[in-house]
Image (cartoon, rainbow, N blue to C red):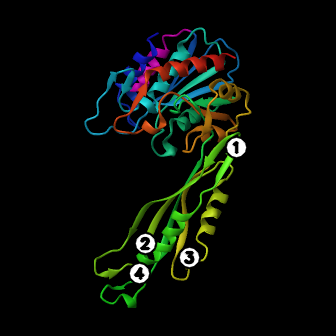
Amino acid sequence: MKDLASLCYELVNIPSVSLDEAGIADYVESILQRAEHLSVVRIENNVVATRRDVGPIRYMVAGHLDTVPPSPGYSVGRKDDRIYGVGASDMKAGLAVMIGLALDPANTSPTRYLFYAAEEIERSQSGIFQVERQWPDALAVEAAILMEPTGVSLEAGCQGTMRARLTIAGKRAHSARPHKGINAIHRSGPFLQRIAAEDQRSVELDGCTFREALSVVRIGGGIANNVVPDQVELTINYRFAPDRKTEAAFAYLVSLFEGLMDQELGDSLVLVDSVDGALPNLSNELLDRLSRRVNAKRAKLGWTDVATFFDRGIAATNYGPGDPELAHSAGEWVAVDEIYRAFEVLSEVLAN
């Protein structure tokens, strides 16, 4: 088996922007097929490896093959015990750990390894769903570890994420006679102030603090320089703690604008899309072992496919090499020692 750092470097050298994962899937499949103790299944650009000789499969380790598009002029390199390149942190270092675990003949844990495509784009295109459609029992496990970059700390659960569209109405008029109209952009001020001033709730679950976040991420209004605008649209992103479901989260947004909305004028708040988060589930046997072994845990503040497993009644958590704050950045890199640290920890946790 290649050493893990070299394996990570080779993976980073294979471009795998979302929906263009064939090359990296070919590479992963070819390496895994050399191991006689593995059963390897290819489903489109997803690769599933399962140990043949360990009885019923109880666990899954999963990681996505795709990356975001590279920045202009990016390069791949290795220097000072770091590997640089698109996806180095998110999550080709994690993929290297997964390959190492799967190939290790001494690792006899009842584990399935899922290398899946299209995580970085619209959720409906996720390779997890492609695998599920052709192999419904592929995810039939007790617990899962998702190799998201966490700096080799445990990041438990994940927050839900919601997108809502707030339309603030006005009345169109000539800008030379603004008193004949109602300026929707001016009316948006109190709405923006209320969002900015909102004291976001924090929720502690399984010893991890989930801090909610509410942001206006887009704003648009006005059609001409001499027209009083009659409409402004705000796109709101709400990251909500996993103790809330979509219905309750949207009800909170509705309540936030009480006293400001004028439905007769045409104000409206519409739910565009939403996906629930995942509770930490650290009482699960595997996740508890990982939590105690790592001895460093925190809440995952973003959304990950831990929620996909949670939706299916599977306890799951985020754990992997790489700094999450470097993910998607122009100078993305991963520390080599974190790759080996993650391999050591997961080898022990899965073996027990």
Question: Which mark's residue is nearer the viewer, 4 or 1?
Answer: 1
Q: Residue tagged by mark 1? A: 205
The Cα atoms of the two marked residues, 4 and 3, are separated by 15 Å
Other-residue count near label 4 (Cα within 10 Å), few / some / many at <14 / 14–19 / ≥20: many
Which quadrant, please, contains the C terminus? top right
Q: Earlier in the sequence, mark 4 or mark 3?
A: 4
Q: Residue 176: horizontal and vertical position, in percent?
A: 30, 88
- Image: 129 above or below 268: above
Question: Which mark's residue is nearer the viewer, 1 or 2?
Answer: 1
Highlighted range, magenta: 24-36
Label 3 sits on what residue type? Met
Disc 2 + disc 3, Cβ < 8 Å: no
Q: Residue tagged by mark 4? A: 183
Other-residue count near label 2 (Cα within 10 Å), few / some / many at <14 / 14–19 / ≥20: many
Q: Earlier in the sequence, mark 2 or mark 3?
A: 2
The local secondary structure at tag 1 comes to strand
Q: Is 128 or 261 nearer to us in this picture?
A: 261
Q: Residue at x 47, y 9 (%)?
A: 1
Task: Indicate left or right for 140 with 115 as reference.
Answer: right
Label 4 sits on what residue type? Asn
The Cα atoms of the two marked residues, 1 and 3, are separated by 34 Å
Mark linked to residue 261 = 3
Was residue 27 drawn as part of the magenta stretch in this picture?
yes
The Cα atoms of the two marked residues, 2 and 4, are separated by 9 Å
Q: Residue tagged by mark 2? A: 232
Find residue 197 and report its image quarter. Answer: bottom right
